[in-house]
Amino acid sequence: MNPIERRSAFTLASVMSLRMLGLFMVLPLFSLYAHQLLGATPALIGFSLGIYGLTQAVFQIPFGAWSDKFGRKKMITLGLFIFILGSMVCACTHTIHGMIIGRALQGAGAVGSTIIALLADLTRENQRSKAMAIIGMTIGMSFSLAMLLGPLLNTWLQVNGIFWLASAMGIFAIFILHKWVPQPTLTTWHADTEPERHSFWTVLKLPELARLNVSIFLLHAIFTASFVVIPISLQLHAHLHANHQWMLYLPVLLLAFIGSIPCIIIAEKKQRLKQFFLAAIFLLSGAELLLWLFAGSLIFSAISLFLFFTGFSVLEAFLPSLVSKTAPAARKGTALGIYSCSQFLGIFVGGSLAGWLYGQFGLTDVFLFCAILTILWATLAFRMKNPQHRIPSDSNNE
C-alpha cells in the first residue's frame, strides 16, 4: 500500500470506529437504564435497543447510491450529523418513546457502505483487501473496547452522559473526515464493494449465500436478544451492579480474544471453516443454556460469557470471509450489501423479540429462546459447503 492508501485506510477506519463506539458503549447498560424511562415496558425496551438496526438496514444502500450522485464526503457528513442528532435526543429524553426516536436516528445515519465506497475510490484494486482488513480489525477492536468502556464510564458519566460522549465522537469523526481523509480524484462504482440493484434478486437466490445471510441475521439477532437481558440478569440474579460489570467483561473479552484467534488461523490454514463454524455455533448454544440454567451464579455467568464471546468472535470473523469466497466476483458488492442488511435486520428482530419474550415469559426464558435459535441454526449450517480457500476468478484481484 502506498502512503495515500495507508492514510485513507486508517483515517476512514477511525471514522467508522468512532461511530461504532458511540453506538455500542451503551449496549451493556441500555436495558437497565431504559427501565427508568417514562412509559418503559420490556417490549419497548427491546424495540428501542434494536430499532437502530432497522433504520440502518433501510438507509445503508440508499446512502451509498446517493454518494455516487452527491459525493462521498457530503453523504458521510450528513450521516454523521444524523447520528449526532440521534445521540443528543437519546441523551436528553426522559421517555422510552423519545429513546426510540433517538436510536432510530442513530441508525439512520447509515454511512458504513459509503465509507467503504470512499475507501474503494482511494485504493487500487490489488490493495483493497488489505484496506478492508484494516477497517474490519478496527471495527472488531472498537466493539470490544465499547463493551468495556460503557460500564466503566457509567460510574462517572451515567448513560445519558455516554450518549453525549457519542455525540462528541461523531463531531470528531467529521473533523477527521475533512481534515485527514484524502479527496478522491474520481468517484466511481466498484463491483467488489458496492451493490448493484439489478442483480439483487439473482444474488438472493444463490443457496450458499442465502445460508450465510440467514447466519449473520441469526448471529446478530441472538447477540442483541441476549444483551436485552444479560445486564439485567447480572444485576438481579448474579448481584453484579452495572458499574462493576466491566470487571467481568474485561477478563472474559480478553480470554475470548485469545481463544478465538487460534481457531480463526487454524480454520483458514487447514481449510476447515465449516467445522469451526459449526463448533462456534455450539459454543453460543452452550453459553445460552448455561445462562438459562445458572443465571444466579457469577462463575457460570463468566463461563457463559467467555463461550458466548469466543463463539461470536469466530463467527463474526468467518462470515464476511465466507461471503467473499462464495459470491460471484462480478457481484461481490451486491452480496456484501445484502449481507449487511441481513445483519442489521437481525439486530432489530432480535431486540424486538427479546423485549416481547421478556415481558411475556420472563427474563431467563430469552436465553432459552436464543439456545433454540442456535440449534436451528446449526441444522441449517450443517448443510453448507466447505468453501475453497481461494476462488480462481478472484485470484487476479488479490
Image: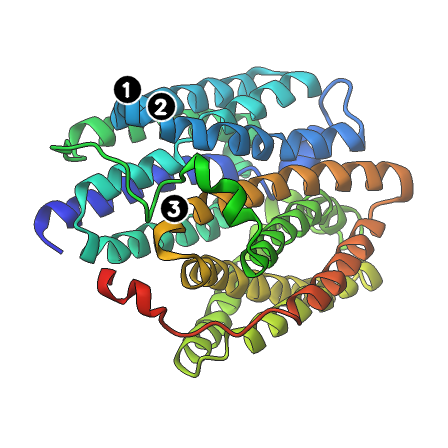
In the rendered image, residue 39, in percent from the top left (x then y), is placed at 78, 19
Sequence-first disc among 1 and 3: 1
Residue on which the image places disc 2: 66
In the rendered image, residue 263, in percent from the top left (x then y), is placed at 48, 76
Residue on which the image places disc 1: 70
Residue 130 appears in which quarter of the rendering?
Answer: bottom left
**What's under tag 2, amino acid-wise?**
Trp
Sequence-first disc among 3 and 2: 2
- Which element is circle 1 on? helix
Up the image or down, 328 lies above or below 116; here it is: below
Up the image or down, 261 lies above or below 62; here it is: below
Crowd around label 3: few <14 · some 14–19 · many ≥20 (10 Å):
many
Residue at image coords 63%, 62%: 308
Q: Quadrant of the C terminus?
A: bottom left
Q: Distance between the residues labelled 3 and 2?
A: 16 Å
Residue at image coords 53%, 67%: 256
Q: Distance between the residues labelled 1 and 3?
A: 20 Å
| Side of 80 relative to 348 (left or right) | left
| Side of 250 relative to 301 (left or right) | left
Residue on which the image places disc 3: 333
Up the image or down, 261 lies above or below 56; here it is: below
| Side of 187 relative to 166 (left or right) | left
